[in-house]
Amino acid sequence: MTAARVLAGGRMVPLLDRIAQKYRLTAPVQEDGVVLYRRVDGGREVCLDFGLPLVPPKAHFFPQTERLFSYNAADGLELKEPPGITASVLFGVRPCDLRGFAALDPVFGGRFADVYYRDKREYTTVVGLGCTTVRPECFCAAYGGSPVDGQGADLMLTRVGESYLAEVLTPKGEQLVRRCAEFFPPEGAEEAVRAKAALGRELEARFNRRVDLAGVKEKADALFESSYWGKPAHRCLGCGICTYLCPTCHCFDIVDEDRGDRTGTRWRCWDSCMFRDFTLHTSGHNPRGSKMERVRNRFLHKLSYHLDRYGLPGCVGCGRCIAACPVNIDITRVIAEIKEVG
């Protein structure tokens, strides 16, 4: 389902004000020079002119720290779960991060669905926002993406001149447009559709990184025992920033906070496969005890394991890990190098 409308650029803030009245609105904001997603009460809080937020919006569905339940065992056992999910809008998601949701959905929504993630997905309308620039680290095109691709959004907005092309892609997107119908006149979308196509071609021509993934999975699979992995491992600091900023990484830990009076809380928090303790068994055995094994696991997860398990790549080409790595480990360079390893 695709229906196109046009939103006047000057109407964006009033639209977000209206959305905030009807939904719980999460959107990009600028705090201390950093763009990140958080809940807002109106359009004036929202940052509309930004590149790629530092932290991907996966935290909306998979929070960095999440209370799963609290308990009181003083008199029997009483469990208290978090309050129910309210209808939400996640606004301003870039195309690469939309694809990140597609990679996470089968992880949390498989045979044993994660209700915490599932409920947030079910009650959230995702509004994508096309890119207006291409960063030096971007390579989403290698994975079939595009700076203006709306795949994964319920409603996709693309800035074209002084207006936004609004593409209704799902019933949830249609419902949002219907509830804010005065902002989306039905006429005049044809020219905006053509302008979006031209913008997409212009942005795609600006990519500095041309990454060829042909044969990479097969080559990576064959290199499990290769000494090559010692090369990036020698430089890696094991800080885990690549995993924390990755839109598809999903390692987590479960922690029980016992207050000592027979009450407590169970928390889920992000973890990282780059940390030695992540795979440390209580017996003392660690199947990924060396940094080389952890580095190898990270890249094989991106280039092979996620494909094997879910039929989807574990990378979306956002380039955050390249931009943030303190020792300049570059996944596109690793891809090129493993193709050359004999």
Image: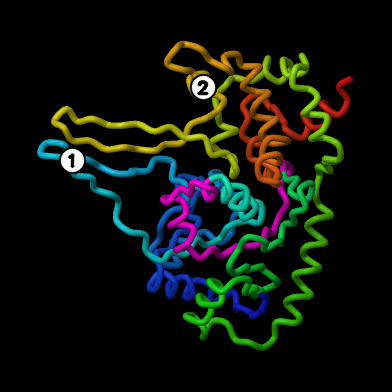
In percent of the image, x 34 and y 44: which residue is there? 68
Question: For the N terminus, which image quadrant?
Answer: bottom right
Q: Is residue 332 left or right of residue 115?
A: right
Q: Which residues are magenta?
A: 108-137
Q: Position of residue 28 (x, y in %)?
A: 50, 56
Q: Nearer the viewer, residue 300 or 142?
A: 300
The image shows residue 238 at horizontal and vertical percentages of: 57, 21
Q: Is residue 135 magenta?
A: yes
Residue 99 disc label: none
Going by the image, does 22 lie left or right of 108? Answer: left
Magenta region includes residue 69: no
Residue bearing the label numbered 1: 77
In space, the residues marked 1 and 2 are separated at their CA atoms by 31 Å
Viewer-proximal residue among 82 and 246: 82
Q: Amino acid at mark 1?
A: Leu
Q: Would you name the residue on which mark 2 appears? A: 279
Residue found at the far left of this picture:
75
The x and y percentages for residue 307 are 71, 41
